Amino acid sequence: MTPVSSPVAPAQRRHYSPEFKLRIVEACRQPGVSVARTALDNGLNANLVRRWIRDAQGRTVALPAFLP
């Protein structure tokens, strides 16, 4: 028996606009919203969305708690 092989195109990385990422991150920050459910509803992997959330948190400017 000979194995049957079908040509498979290499997977292309998808690129998402910063606006789309921000919309998904903001949706995930709402109280009671599941990151996994939001990801699945948008055809995304939950780990990817969690990375976007982590990256967005790193970009926010933290103000000191006390300003003299």
Image (cartoon, rainbow, N blue to C red):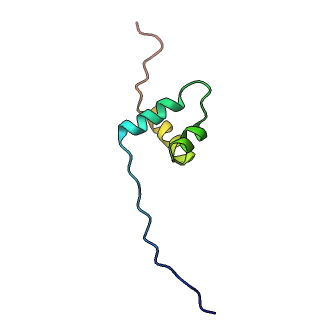
Instruction: Tell me if residue 40 comes above or below residue 32 in the rendering.
Output: below
At 44% from the left and 64% from the top, the residue drawn is 11
Q: Quadrant of residue 50?
A: top right
Taking the view exactly as shown, the residue that stands out farthest to the bottom is 1
Image quadrant holding the C terminus, namely top left
Image quadrant holding the N terminus, namely bottom right
Instruction: Tell me if residue 24 comes above or below residue 3 in the rendering.
Output: above
At 36% from the left and 36% from the top, the residue drawn is 19
Q: Give the percent coordinates (x, y) of residue 22.
A: 42, 34
Q: Quadrant of residue 31?
A: top right
> Foreground: 31 or 55?
31
Q: Give the percent coordinates (x, y) of residue 18.
A: 36, 39
Q: Give the percent coordinates (x, y) of residue 15.
A: 38, 50
At 38% from the left and 46% from the top, the residue drawn is 16
Would you say 16 lies left or right of 50 here? left
Q: Quadrant of residue 55?
A: top left
> Foreground: 54 or 65?
54
> Foreground: 23 or 52?
23
> Foreground: 52 or 14?
14
Q: Report whether residue 58 is seen.
A: no
Q: How many marks?
A: 0
Q: Report whether residue 19 is seen.
A: yes
Q: Give the percent coordinates (x, y) of residue 64.
A: 44, 17
Instruction: Tell me if residue 14 comes above or below residue 26 in the rendering.
Output: below
